[in-house]
Image: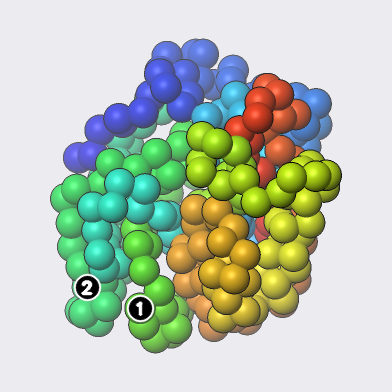
Amino acid sequence: MIKPQFAGQFYESDFEKLSKQIEHCYTGDLGPGDLPTKRTEKITKGIILPHARYTYSGQCAAWAYKEIAESKFPKTFIILFPDHTGTHFDYATTLEDFETMLGVVQVDKEFIEKLLKTNLVKKTTTIKEHSIEVQLPFLQVSNKDKMNEIKIVPIICPTTNNYKELAQEIAKISNDICIIISSDFTHYGPKFGYTPFKFNIKQSIKDLDKNAIELILNYKSKEFLKYVKKTKATICGQYPIALGLEILKQINSENPELLCYYNSNKIMPNESQVSYASISFR
């Protein structure tokens, strides 16, 4: 069992406070405005959303999770997330379940066993990543009518080696899946060692992100990776995004939509800042 390691830092560690914090993410000024309504037969095949502290990016994430909450419940959620610690060199997953303040999130062991047989993903017991942990309470709340049925396949993505082949293998295992891609966008300022703009910084950051998002909305994973390399854009989830886009193409996603975009300066003005976006794929 993987225990919560970032509770009290990235989100509230108390059950009641956490529930209220997530509710505020939906109803806050930058959130979708209201809580999710009833589930429909709409199919959401994937989402991209941020993984910062709830106080910063939670309202952006709520836009994507509202899509999940109001869509048909999939058999499996594939969660793709970056390796901030540099612990891994290959794609990796785990057979261990995750514990949160709201209960246990089970992994889809049958799916994972099939995935491991491809030899494109390794098994690990070492996952210390806020970029997946912050997604789990939101996932539970957005699927509270199916909370005990949630099954996930966590995949840490430290590379793009064989990413198109891996996407094909994932789609072969099942197409009754929803891809959750965990990524912030541009990290700008001295804290992040990224200060390429001297003038019109706010608009320059927005343009940098806009061009990346445009490639994402057109499922252009290769061009997206080239763009990030060329501009040195500090998009921490670039590898999960590339893999996710290829999986989405394999499962015939055709209707992407940018739901929300804002910068952390909207919450707390600072020279160092991070951009957040929520994108849905149907």
Residue in the picture at 41% in, 78% down: 163
Q: Using the image, determine if residue 159 lies above or below residue 16.
A: below
Question: Observer-nearest residue: 195 or 6?
Answer: 195
Residue in the picture at 51% in, 62% down: 238
Disc 2 to disc 1, how far (Cα)?
A: 16 Å
The residue type indicated by label 1 comes to Asn
Select label 2 or label 1 by which is in front.
1
- Marking on residue 116: 2
Quadrant in which the N terminus appears: top left
Residue indicated by mark 1: 161
Packing grade of label 2 (10 A; few <14, some 14-19, many >=20) is some
Q: Is residue 245 left or right of residue 27?
A: left
Give the total of numbered labels.
2
Question: Observer-nearest residue: 166 or 172?
Answer: 166
Q: Using the image, determine if residue 117 lies above or below residue 260.
A: below
Q: Measured from the top left, where is residue 171 in percent x and y?
A: 45, 79
